[in-house]
Amino acid sequence: MRQDPKPAANRQAMPLGQARAERGGDKAGRRTAPLRALQLLTSTALCLAGWTGTAMAEVERFEITRTLSPAFEGQTFGATGAYERIDGIAHLAIDPMSERGRRIVDLDKATPDADGLVRYSAEVSLLRPVEAATRSGTLLYEVPNRGRNLMFNLFNMADTTAIPETAGQAGDGHLMEQGYTLVWSGWQGDLTGELLKMTLPVLPDVTGMSREEFVFDKAEAVSTATLTYPAADEDPAKASLSVRLRPEDPRSTVAGLSFRYLSPTSIEITRPDGLDAGAIYEFVYPAKDAVPAGLAMAATSDVVSWLRGNPGHAAEPVATGIEHTIGIGISQSGRFLRDLIHHGFNADEGGARVFDGAIPHIAGSRKTFTNARFAQPGRYSRQHEDHDVYGDQFPFSYAETTDPLSGQSGSILSACGETDTCPKVMHTDTSTEFWQARAALVSTAPDGTPLEMPETVRLYFMSGAPHFKAWSAASGTTPVCRNPTNPLSAAPVMRGLLQAMRAWISDGTPPPDSRFPSLADGTLVPLHKLNLPSLAGEAVLPVYNVLKLRDHSVTPPLAGPAYPVLVPQVDADGIPQGGIKDPLVAVPLGTYWGWNLRAEGYAGGGLCGLEGSFLPFAAAAQAADGDARAPLAARYADEAAYLAALQASATALVEAGLMLEADIAAVLDKGRATYAAVTGAN
């Protein structure tokens, strides 16, 4: 959400020592008693001297808009009891000329208030135990995915993406039973409705060319498309529309292609007769009403800093007793979490740590299109869609590397390493990220050599899993994809890893060692060495979302040389190696892939989104029909034998610290349902 720049009501200036956090303290980001005493003396002296400075970045005020106590219709969760929900708006301020402010693209072009600060706001939702005595002291913050909650899908096995409040949205209540304080806050200004969002100042003097890409995936003569930013000039001659079937094809203005403005933020595209439904339409136009979208990083940093009790904020506390913080980002928000750390915002204005632990989930090697002019944080690169969008350039890894293509050096952790504010990191990817998000670049240098991660980083690969599925998902078909979809959820393993992260940051208990494909042991290979099994007499080698060095100073960006193309090697069943095998993957009823292929008529042969594939095994050898994989009859005598093997696999993961013992029953239930579906289909 954007707002026109206008002066906010002046607040009384706070003494420097009170409003700005001390840049000292222990490594956990908390000041020692002597430093607190020193700050108090400094603050008092400055007050007596009549100093009237203001903080450079802070939560000035928290406006509570709604309190629901108890939430979840009064449902209680084990020894934790009932929960309550608090919704509000965090009113924030930042000095655009401060060190942090200068990191935010175009913030210097925002109109400041009389005191030199730029003000903006973010919506916040918080869930916590009603009884203070049952709160664990750990704050679990999820960066919302497009304003939505995904961590309840992942950790509570729920089906909702709403910020939860009803009993039906609680899932199995796992997070609440653990006593977490759960928080979400808005970081996107381009959302509407009930989605958590920010309100940002508009930059009236900033105009320029913006680029949109549309893949409609349906056959229609005329399509309507929405623009992220309004057109600065609706003269059609000042904009361009092109079409191509595949990302690497030249942009074309074929006969029958045209557009017209319906409004400053909407265009109508007339499509050429007979053109493939999956064609890529690119629109470049003069835009206005840019916003300093990079304030998302300052807002997230400052809201969590305030909630955990770091000094330097004028707003009254809402959360108390917070001892540790974990940040989780899923997909788009996982990329944002990497970006936030990369830009140095895991340190707050006073230099204190924000997140003690960070879990970027299914982000691959990517960051986001956020801290840039005419940002579009909802866009991300796939092999077919938005292939060359901004946000996928060096650095890729948490290890210090040098990029031979760009000549740059560094890592995701370079900025926080300079201030001793790096979080402990669990980077978790599924199979899809190796194909669509070049996850190999997290563990492999751009020159193709293996990397050694810092001791504070773990890498985990969910072998065979698709990008993201709720626990209740089932395999199905779509018109756009060639294969049945992959229904796997990473929930059981992720619940185990969250518990390990909590122990890691609270008492230093080391988590399980990394499990990620590697060149060193042959579980990571060049694409041409992938040994896919023959299915129905053929082995189809998928395409890959190749990353190239790109010059984004021009529109469209110019492509340079390509980075290595590396993927996990597969076993005789076609299942990826080198990671954590969920019991359903370790004891398979079919082949699980993180990739799927587009069907003919929809840019056939390209990677089909993020769905993944599930290809069940044949029931018996005579039914295999050219399938090189062993049939079900050769694997399991009956359902009981299958479930026994499934339980043994789950128990092994529990013993390795990668799953919770309490989740074995849910895995067995899922196995029964999958066995019934596969054998019924056969």
Image (cartoon, grey):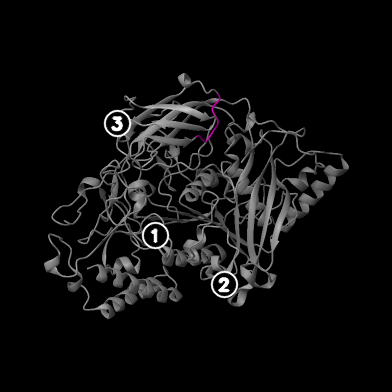
Tell me where residue 174 appears, x and y as whole percent.
Answer: 52, 70
The answer to which of marks 3 and 1 sits earlier in the sequence is: 3
Where is mark 2, residue-wise? Answer: 177
Q: Earlier in the sequence, mark 3 or mark 2?
A: 2
Figure check: 52 above or below 485: above
Amino acid type at mark 3? Asp
Q: Which residues fall within the magenta stretch?
A: 227-232
Q: Give the distance between the C-alpha atoms of the residues marked 3 and 2, in whole angstroms.
A: 53 Å
Q: On residue 514, which mark appears? A: 1
Magenta stretch holds residue 230: yes
Q: CA distance from mark 3 to mark 1?
A: 39 Å
Q: Nearer the viewer, mark 3 or mark 2?
A: 3
> Which quarter of the picture shows residue 492?
bottom left
Mark 1 is on which residue type?
Answer: Ser
Task: Name above or below for residue 303 compared with residue 261.
Answer: below
Q: Residue at x 51, y 46 (%)?
A: 336
Mark 2, other Cα within 10 Å: few <14 / some 14–19 / many ≥20: some
Q: Residue at x 42, y 39 (%)?
A: 394
**Residue 202, magenta (yes or no):** no
Name the residue tied to disc 3.
Answer: 249
Please give the count of numbered marks on the rendered protein.
3
Query: Looking at the image, do the residues carrying marks 3 and 1 touch, with CB atoms under 8 Å apart?
Result: no
Determine the CA span between mark 1 and mark 2. Answer: 28 Å
